[in-house]
Image (cartoon, helix red, strand yellow):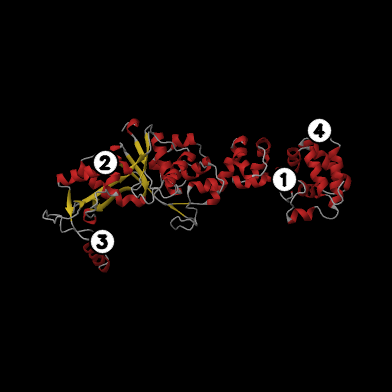
Amino acid sequence: MSASEVVTRFAPSPTGFLHIGGARTALFNWLYARRHGGKFVLRIEDTDKARSTQAAIDAILDGMKWLGLDWDGDTHFQSEYAGRHAEVAHALLGSGHAYRCWMTQEELAAGREAAKAERRPFRTRSPWRDREDGPDAPFVIRLRAPQDGETAIDDQVQGRVTVQNEELDDFVLLRSDGSPTYMLAVVVDDHDMGVTHVIRGDDHLNNAFRQLVIIRAMGLPEPVYGHVPLIHGQDGAKLSKRHGALGVETYRDELGILPEALFNYLLRLGWGHGDDEIISRQQAVQWFDIDAVGKSPSRFDLKKLENLNGHYLREADPARLAALIAPKIEGADADLLARAMPVLTPRAKDLNELGDGASFLFKSVPLDMDEKAASLIAGDAADLLGRVRQSLAALSDWTAEATEQAVREVAEASGVKLGQVAQPLRAALTGRATSPGIFDVLALLGRDESLARIADARTGKD
């Protein structure tokens, strides 16, 4: 197959957000298409109108754009093709690959109860499979599934997987109200959109066997399948909200994760390239292939994501970070924030911590002191701060290097260690017991602000 013939797709149901598992599925499809020079199609499975609100659809589109997963052509909506789906169902009816069924809900319920009592899977066995003398009443159209032999899939992730055809049932293609089922719609849409490779979670593997029956009945080319193991939590259980199964927007808006960090982390959930942990978007496109995805479920680890995010914070453009955190800080100045990034990012693992760490820059005297900081400026510390202020005020050159020399001289003259001066000075300047390097803090705050804060913090202010 040539590169130009490769078409992958991502087809989510709008549930109000782009789930982290769905985001990885989208990423793998996007990478496969980009790696092979093909196309990546986005289709919204919006046939459930109660759930398919515009807000839910927008959440998917926004999440995709934030991650940088651009798609080719327009966004497709499954509901737009209902007429085409019904047309195919009737064509299968005409070719004998499907039949009309008038089974009642009571008959179906009785069949389920019998299967439950006998502890076997429920398979629809319609009495109308070989009959055409149905009543003048609404009916569904069912697929006439094969009952003998087996169906095999050579899956790019799972390998060769086989199911006995007797396990397949005559599922519904078209409901009695004329609406198509998902099983039919997805096959028709994939064919009509030229999809060649179906990469999705392995919870859809059973669907693949049923969809293949439709594909073969229609005489269509079979897609290449790759069913990826689902993401689990650290405890090995299926991923849930307590493990981090959240929407992409939560990682962006609440957890302060950068898109390149989430991109890199999702890429490494089930796929690898040797021992490489930090993988750029360009490298991912160059290296990714579906046959390198493992067969075992990957485990989501929020701590690893945060550590990876810390790396990308340190690599990010300071002006970009400043623009991202400025709205989180009252009175923030983007230029000062950008200058502060080199000393702030080593201490932060997400944008929230970065914003919190930068907040001292925009406080006004008197500073709100946390309990530990207040204890650091009590007692004899006030005298030390007075000497430090006097020494700093005499400086003609206000740089980190110059202020460090001045503070060291105060410590030596006072017969104390540098830390005994730096700790109360930090508290006076930031209102906290922890901060970036104190001389970087002095340089960022500038002469006037630094001297004002030291004076305010002293007992018996000048």
Of tags 3 and 2, the one toward the viewer is 3
Query: Is 57 or 202 nearer to us in this picture?
Result: 57
User: 154 left or right of 348?
Assistant: left
Q: Amino acid at mark 1?
A: Lys
Query: What residue did someone put label 4 on?
Result: 397
Query: What residue did someone put label 3 on?
Result: 122
Query: What residue did someone put label 1 on?
Result: 363
Q: Amino acid at mark 4?
A: Asp
Q: Residue at x 78, y 56 (%)?
A: 375
Q: Residues within 10 Å of mark 1 (few under 14, many from 20)?
A: some
Q: Which mark is residue 222?
A: 2
Spot the residue most to the front. 136
Query: Is 264 or 155 nearer to us in this picture?
Result: 264
Name the secondary structure under disc 2: loop
Q: Picture coordinates of residue 310 (x, y %)?
A: 59, 44
Q: Quadrant of the N terminus?
A: top left
Q: Is residue 144 above or below residue 40?
A: below
User: 342 left or right of 220?
Assistant: right
Report the Cα–Cα distance between label 4 and label 2: 74 Å
Report the Cα–Cα distance between label 1 and label 4: 24 Å
